[in-house]
């Protein structure tokens, strides 16, 4: 008896992989496999978005709270950049997101909201439009107020 997707996704995925490897294509759960494959791409996009939000939040904090700048923020900025650049190298199609104005606007909004929460600076003090170019944001040693 086959394992139902809804009952145990982990065991279901192992079973489906075995069915595919054995060539038993008539038994596979095509609809759920297709959904899972799509979810892999969505997961990568979410991961990129989350890392961009963290990076932009820290850049906002760096810019708007110069007296609080420190090595911890600098490490976070460097770590996020490195992770983002690795993701873009390993999954080149993610680069499209970096030119998608709607996607960037959502990321910027999330970064502004996070920065407000972390700094207690009023949300409206952060510009509505992205303050820096993506290439600049991802430049290894760049920090706001250093250009």
Image (spheres, grey):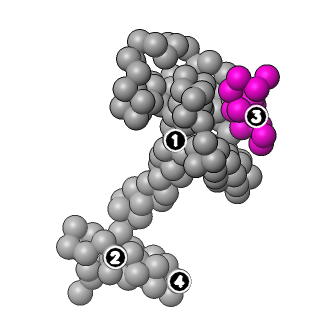
Mark number displayed over residue 142: 3
Mark with earlier residue (3, 2)? 2
Mark with earlier residue (2, 1)? 2
Cα distance between the residues tagged 2 and 4: 17 Å
Q: Residue shown at 40%/56% (left/top)?
A: 35
Cα distance between the residues tagged 3 and 2: 43 Å
Please report the bounds of the magenta region as a residue range. Answer: 135-147
Cα distance between the residues tagged 2 and 1: 30 Å
Q: Nearer the viewer, mark 3 or mark 2?
A: 3
Residue 115 position in % (x across, y down): 44, 30
Q: Nearer the viewer, mark 4 or mark 3?
A: 3
Cα distance between the residues tagged 4 and 3: 48 Å
In the displayed structure image, the side of residue 117 where residue 130 appears, left or right = right
Residue 84 position in % (x across, y down): 65, 48
What residue did someone put label 2 on? 10
Q: Nearer the viewer, residue 66 or 10?
A: 66
Judging from the image, what secondary structure is the residue with disc 2 in? helix
Q: Are marks 4 and 3 in contact (CB under 8 Å)?
A: no
Mark with earlier residue (1, 3)? 1
């Amino acid at each position: 008896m086959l394992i139902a997707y809804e009952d145990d996704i982990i065991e279901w995925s192992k079973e489906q992989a075995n069915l595919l490897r054995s060539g038993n294509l008539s038994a596979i759960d095509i609809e759920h496999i297709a959904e899972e494959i799509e979810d892999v791409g969505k997961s990568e996009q979410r991961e990129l978005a989350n890392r961009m939000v963290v990076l932009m939040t820290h850049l906002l904090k760096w810019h708007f709270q110069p007296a609080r700048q420190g090595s911890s923020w600098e490490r976070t900025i460097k770590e996020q950049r490195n992770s983002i650049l690795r993701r873009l190298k390993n999954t080149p199609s993610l680069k499209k997101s970096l030119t998608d104005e709607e996607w960037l606007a959502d990321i910027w909004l999330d970064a502004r909201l996070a920065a407000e929460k972390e700094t207690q600076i009023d949300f409206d003090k952060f510009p509505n439009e992205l303050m820096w170019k993506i290439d600049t944001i991802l430049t290894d040693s760049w920090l706001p107020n250093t250009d």
